[in-house]
Amino acid sequence: MWQGDGYWLVRFGFQRGLALLYLLAFLVAAKQFRPLAGEDGLLPLERYVEGVPVRDRPSLFYFLPSDRSIGIAAWTGVGLSALALAGVPYWLPAGYATPASMALWAALWALYLSFVNAGQTFYGYGWESMLCETGFLAIFFGAGSVAPPFVVILLVQWVLFRNMFGAGLIKLRGDDCWRDLTCMDYHYETQPIPNPVSWFAHHLPDRFHRVETVGNHVLELLVPFLYFAPQPLSALAGAATIGFQGWLMVTGNFAWLNALTIVLAIPTFSDGTLAAVLPISAPATAPTPLYLETLAILLAAVVAVLSVRPVQNILSERQLMNTSFDPLNLVNTYGAFGSITRNRYEVVVEGTTDEEITAATEWQPYRFKGKPTDPERRPPQVAPYHLRLDWQLWFAAMSPSPRRHPWFHRFLAKLLEADADTLALLAEDPFDGEPPTYVRAVRYRYRYTTPEERAESGRWWSRERVGTYVRPVSLEEVRVREPRL
């Protein structure tokens, strides 16, 4: 009963998919963590070290708080992820494969947990804790010819269930538009980072949006219960979930949330169902080692205890979204888009080299890699890559001022210094690496152009100015206004 004899292919596919996402996540950390949360980042690493007890958010960077340590950890993670992606433990002799696999996945989990716990606001996303939780379970899957413990298959399905069912409940309890079936009228336009298909999805008929909202409720509230059903029902539920996540990937940029959910859905299949639709077959497997079975059962007991608070949260009328209840992110609660914004606001950051601000001053916009600034620019496809600064700017634009976003004035200061690491986070620096004399931030309301407007102007967006987010400031002025972090 406890041996997943029919899950060797499932484990192999799950591990390869998870390794690929780890590889991407560590590449993002290598490229973005230092300018965002490093020694001199927008939210400096010192802020984490001094502000949070290590027992509450354990991280290697609590003990080694330096950019050098960050770089070593990130690129080590890239290298280990590549080994996992290549399936190196499977190359080892029997008896060594599973211990090597456990050590490899444990190292990946510990390294990435360090980034998540020290990354502060820039790592405060549900897919971060989900990657940590999933990565911890991967430690106990085994490798080589041995069969994976069936209980770990069930634990991965439990993560998938909480991910989907939590998202469904937070919607029903949240915005009225999920109940009157109108949320999708706004979603494609107001989501954090639209992609090239989002404009077209937005302009689909209203009837389609009603049907897809009903479909969303079915897929998130009813289908998850079938994950634990016998085959082929479990596989059909997994296939429906994969199709749903694929649609979300086609119509938006949600980092690796959808890709990770697809990976989590792989254990809803069995080797038999995979072999029935794919030209593959599983090799003969050896029994699961007793030590791995024992560890898997102990793991299940720990998960059962730690699941009490997430389950209470799911059942609560005051359900929290994307919350961790333990410092190791072992069992978390998830959810997405409990409320939908009706209007899209954007903060456009501009600079000038004029020595004095006048009515004739020409302001040049900084362009970001994902978020819309230029109305003529086609929305890009960036997912599953994660543009962390762009995402936080989406949240920041919801407020009429940066008061709730203490990193924003520091970001302006970095632009006034022409900080190379910060500028590397952008798509275009209008000053070619030279510091401007002043910068400002202007708040706009953006909306998609209609098909007629786009045919005439070629623009994807129409916008109107709704206010000043930060008035023109010099480096000296922004340093005075910069909040104490």
Image (spheres, rainbow, N blue to C red):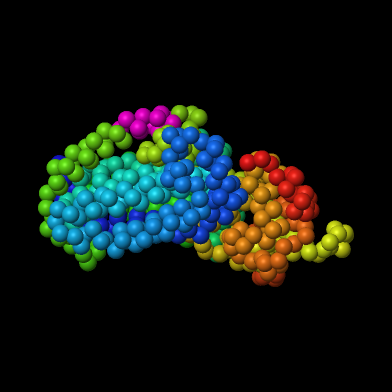
Location of the C terminus by quadrant is top right
Residue 205 quadrant: bottom right
Q: Name the quarter where the N terminus is drawn.
A: top left
Region of the chain picked out in magenta, as a range: 304-315
**In this figure, what is the number of numbered marks?**
0
Q: Is residue 463 above or below residue 164?
A: below
Residue at 25% x, 53% y is 101
Secondary structure mostly seen in the magenta stretch: helix
- Residue 272: tell me if it is visible: no
Q: Would residue 418 be counted in the magenta stretch?
A: no
Q: Position of residue 220 (x, y in %)?
A: 41, 44
Q: Please say whether residue 357 is visible from this viewpoint.
A: yes
Reply above or below: 57 against 316. below
Residue closest to the eye, 117 or 231: 117
Instruction: Tell me what residue is drawn at x 34 percent, y 62 percent.
Output: 82
x and y percentages locating residue 107 in the rendered image: 33, 50
Please name the residue shown 30% across and 45% down the image.
137
Tell me if residue 313 is in the magenta stretch.
yes
Could you tell me residue 165's position as x and y percent? 40, 40
Give residue 56's position: percent from left, percent from top: 45, 34
- Asked if residue 301 is positioned above or below residue 95 in the image, the reply reads above
Could you tell whether 28 is left or right of 422 in the image? Answer: left
For the point 50% across and 30% down, which residue is it?
Answer: 318
Residue 217: name its quadrant. top left
Which residue is more in the foreground, 263 or 139? 139
